[in-house]
Image: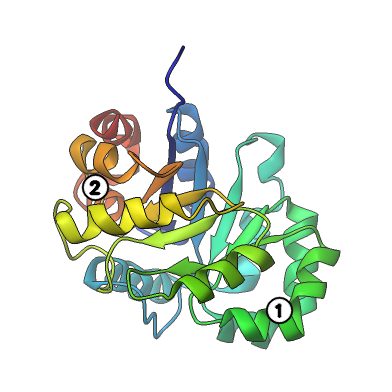
Amino acid sequence: MQEEKKLLSIYFTAGYPDLNNTVQIIQDLEKNGVDMIEIGLPFSDPLADGPTIQASSTKALENGMTTNLLFKQLKNIRETVSIPLIIMGYFNPMMQYGVEAFCKKCQEIGIDGLIIPDLPVDVYHEEYQVIFEKYGLINVFLITPQTSDERINFIDSVSNGFIYMVSSASVTGSQSGFGNTQQNYFKRIAAMNLKNPQIVGFGISNTETFSQATTDAKGAIIGSAFIKHLTSKGVNNIGEFVKSIR
């Protein structure tokens, strides 16, 4: 029996390294076999992000990236790209844009879902789930080793895509390799038999960490390591990065 292929998802910040790189990066990632892409909408106060992604966010904002501009850049993305696209961003810019207007725009472009680290699941469930579902968007919630089983089960019950398993309680890009604590956490979640598949993020930067993270999970998300690659190699060596992961 063929072993199930593990999903590789890559995160990058829209508008970084240069303002108009967004579409090319998405197209190149798909060409090189990435399964899903998280497009980061830069924000001035990104709480869950480590220094690498924060710096890319700051630079993207300085370059002139805005919500409106991102939507403009992605307007025809579905003419060339078919893999799932997720926008990761903080709730403030979405509220400023108007939550329903934002969701409607995502549907028009062909965005599959959103990851909003600072939107609590209870608030989503009570106030916004109806809007997300109206526009066919999945909302992806983060869980950490500190999240209780009760809360994880609640998140699983209101989710309809996948669950983002944060491998540690720290910010992105701040660890190398996984210790026993993380391995036990991966196993604990796998044993819960949740209805939504889990994708692991934070701390994955090479073949070894990708393989460790996906032993018990469906796939893994790489952000900081890819941003570092863009910073040092630019946008023309994306295939080289993907090959270094699997």
Residue appearing at x 48%, y 28% in the figure: 31
123 relative to 136, above or below: below
Asked which secondary structure carries label 1, the reply is: helix
Where is mark 1, residue-wise? 125
| Residue 79: image location, x then y, percent | 71, 36
Q: Quadrant of residue 212?
A: top left
Q: What's under tag 2, amino acid-wise? A: His
The label on residue 14 is none
Where the C terminus falls, by quadrant?
A: top left
Residue appearing at x 30%, y 61% in the figure: 167
Residue appearing at x 66%, y 44% in the figure: 77
| Residue 98: image location, x then y, percent | 74, 83
Model colouring: rainbow
Q: Nearer the viewer, mark 1 or mark 2?
A: 1
Tell which of 10 and 148 is nearer to you.
148
Residue appearing at x 72%, y 61% in the figure: 106
Q: What's under tag 1, amino acid-wise? A: His
Task: Calculate the distance from the C-alpha at mark 1 to the C-alpha at mark 2.
Answer: 37 Å
Query: In the image, 228: left or right of 16?
Result: left
Q: Quadrant of residue 233?
A: top left
Where is mark 2, residue-wise? 229
62 relative to 110, above or below: below
Q: Quadrant of residue 78?
A: top right
Tell which of 5 and 156 is nearer to you.
156
The answer to whether any part of residue 223 appears in the image is no
